[in-house]
Image (spheres, rainbow, N blue to C red):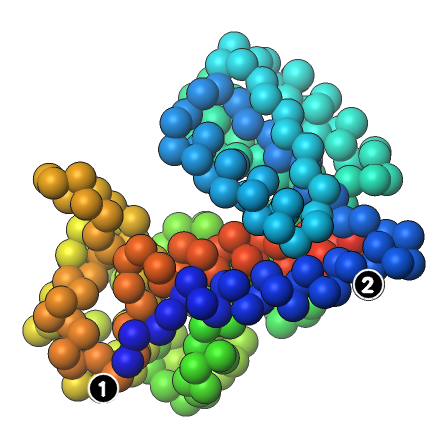
Amino acid sequence: MIINGKELAENIRSSLKLEVDNMKKQGITPKLAVIMVGDNKASEVYVRNKSKACNEIGIEFEEFLKDENTSQKELIELIDMLNSRNDIHGILLQSPIPKHLDIREAFNRINPKKDVDGFHPINVGKLSIGEDSFISCTPYGIMKMLEAYHINVEGKRAVVIGRSNIVGKPVAQCLLNQNATVTICHSRTQDIAKVVQEADIVIAALGKPKFVTADMIKEGAVVIDVGINRNEEGKLVGDVDFENVEKKASYITPVPGGVGPMTIAMLMSNVVKAAKEM
């Protein structure tokens, strides 16, 4: 069965809109601030999509565009200013940022209570010990998908391919928190195919087009494809060979229309959560 992330995200956004309408009646208007440094074209598209989603739900949106030559000091001062503003509930630093800037220091400077991306060490730490926290939007979206399709992860063998701080590690932690048995594979893993073949749930987040092939998947496995790649024809493809893997998987996410829309929906959810808790 194909997991329809687009439809699920639309449902989440609709219920968030009702929630925001009610919050506004109580005098609370959730607000997201997005910082973009430089003129990365892909980032511009992502920011536009976030702005559109905010608009649709009723979340206020303020954008802070800084040029390529912005210094670390200027970036930190901007974050400090946004931390101090009571009308701003969520702060998002759009990556990538120019190479001369220290993104880790910038993420760490964001107030953990406004860290709607879930990248601050305090939120990462809380997730690892099972406390309530802001969860990175893509892993959060994946867990919501599994929940919506009644896919129970408890006791299941889950294999995560990719160990990034944005997807791989936090999604592994989310699965562990729900009592899955989790293995993380990465570029140094020996015989990845053999490890993946044992999985009941496969999450591919490594950024290599069609890396996961049908012979790596056991019959009836759940396959979540986080990859967004362009092939030679410029067509969007995932990290999974969808056409062939679909024949063996019990559930699979498409690219596009799978994990992508869920990421933005969960960002909106995190902004609403931040506004409620401030």
Q: Nearer the viewer, residue 127 or 259?
A: 259
- Relative to residue 142, is residue 242 drawn left or right? left
Q: Residue drawn 68% across and 38% down?
A: 61
Residue 242 place in picture, x, y as percent: 18, 65
Q: Tell me the number on the disc at residue 246.
A: none
Q: Amino acid at mark 2?
A: Asn
Q: In the structure shown, which secondary structural element does the residue marked by tag 1 occupy?
A: loop
Residue receiving disc 2: 22
Above or below for 48 versus 263: above
Q: Nearer the viewer, residue 196 or 89?
A: 89
Q: Amino acid at mark 1?
A: Gly
Q: In the structure shown, which secondary structural element does the residue marked by tag 2 occupy?
A: helix
Q: Spatial distance from mark 2 to mark 1, Cα to Cα? A: 42 Å
Residue 3 place in picture, x, y as percent: 35, 73
Residue 126 place in picture, x, y as percent: 65, 62
Residue receiving disc 1: 220
Mark 1 residue crowding within 10 angstroms, few (<14) / some (14–19) / many (20+) = some
Q: Residue drawn 55% across and 69% down?
A: 11
- Within the image, what quadrant is residue 196 found in? bottom left
Instruction: Say whether residue 29 is visible.
Output: yes
Mark 2 residue crowding within 10 angstroms, few (<14) / some (14–19) / many (20+) = few
